[in-house]
Image (cartoon, rainbow, N blue to C red):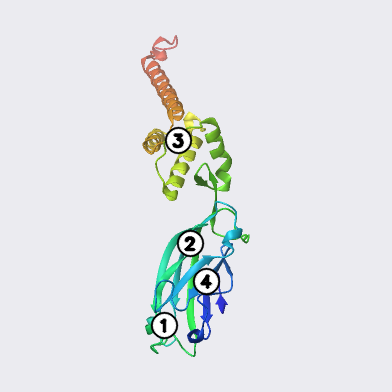
Amino acid sequence: MENQTDKKITWVIKNFSTLTSKKIFSDEFVVSGCRWRLMAFPKGNNKPNHLSLYLVVADSKSLPLGWRRHAKFSFTIVNQFSDQLSQTEELQKWYDQKTPDWGFTNIISLTKLHAGEGFLVNGDVIVAVKVDVLEVVGKLDVWEESSPVMETIDVNGFQVLPCQVESVKRLFERHVDIASKFRAKNPFLKTACMNVLLSLTQTMCQSPQEISKDDLAGQYAALSYLKDSGFELGWLEKKLDKRKYTDLEAQLDKVEDELFVARAPDVSLYDDNAV
């Protein structure tokens, strides 16, 4: 590994033309608390006459069961004559135990690499890599105090933040069938729905005085969306209806008070001091 900054890595493959190994690896590097390395097939991986290049989760077999990582990354085969001629490819993928590596079987052809156009100079091929770790399911390999990665934990098939774990567990303990008919499979949509549900349950803890008519309408809209997604929320709908009726009763009491005041006679007309 030649050079490494926060999320950008440069790998110089020395003596590329004389390599005899089927595949080679870079040194390990850490991005956002996750260990990675690069894997290259100098003669191609199921793609003859091409350089194949992959971003690999380092030591993936030693990671705990259920780990997942979502990363966006790019590979650039650097043109050493002109940076404008460099060749870049980009991917965004989820990594897991079954697929601990992602990349390109045909990042560049060997014909182009050996054509003297600046991709292979003095026997060296330079690969520039940029990695952004978007989400981690499970523990980080290396703890970084300033890591921007959103680390999540699986609770009944939903990826939630550590601070949400207890709330989600209580939901499933009290309402076992709450997600038995939930249909979404996309992890992003599942997380979004759970966040909406948590927000809805939190607002239900507020006093009626803190909830405006628009907020109440928004709660019903959120409830309808979650029910359409397959959540069993009859218990929550009852609470929301009760709050609605409580709010209506409060409004009626207020109107009655106002009417009573409006109908009350002018005391000054019956004042003994009135002229």
Nearest to viewer (mark 3 / mark 2): 3
Per the image, label 3 sits on a secondary structure element best described as: loop
Q: Determine which of the numbered discs, if any, sits on residue 83 in the image.
A: 1
Q: Are marks 4 and 3 in contact (CB under 8 Å)?
A: no
Q: Residue at x 52, y 66 (%)?
A: 56
Q: Compare residues 8 and 178 and report the one nearer the observer.
A: 178
Which of disc 2 and disc 4 is earlier in sequence?
4
* Direction from residue 135 to residue 110 in the image, left or right: left
Per the image, label 1 sits on a secondary structure element best described as: helix
Nearest to viewer (mark 4 / mark 1): 4
Name the residue type under label 2. Ala
Nearest to viewer (mark 2 / mark 1): 2
Q: Determine which of the numbered discs, if any, sits on residue 71 in the image.
A: 2
The answer to whether 104 is drawn above or below residue 262 in the figure is: below
Q: CA distance from mark 4 to mark 2?
A: 14 Å
Residue 206 image point, x, y percent? 51, 33
Residue 79 image point, x, y percent? 42, 83
Instruction: Give the residue pinned by disc 4.
Output: 38
Residue 197 image point, x, y percent? 46, 39
Name the residue type under label 1. Asp
Per the image, label 4 sits on a secondary structure element best described as: strand
Q: Determine which of the numbered discs, if any, sits on residue 180 in the image.
A: 3
Q: CA distance from mark 2 to mark 1?
A: 25 Å
- Structural crowding at the residue carrying mark 1, measured as other residues with C-alpha within 10 Å and reported as few (<14), some (14–19) or many (≥20): few
Q: Compare residues 164 and 118 and report the one nearer the observer.
A: 118
Residue 22 image point, x, y percent? 50, 76
- Structural crowding at the residue carrying mark 2, measured as other residues with C-alpha within 10 Å and reported as few (<14), some (14–19) or many (≥20): some
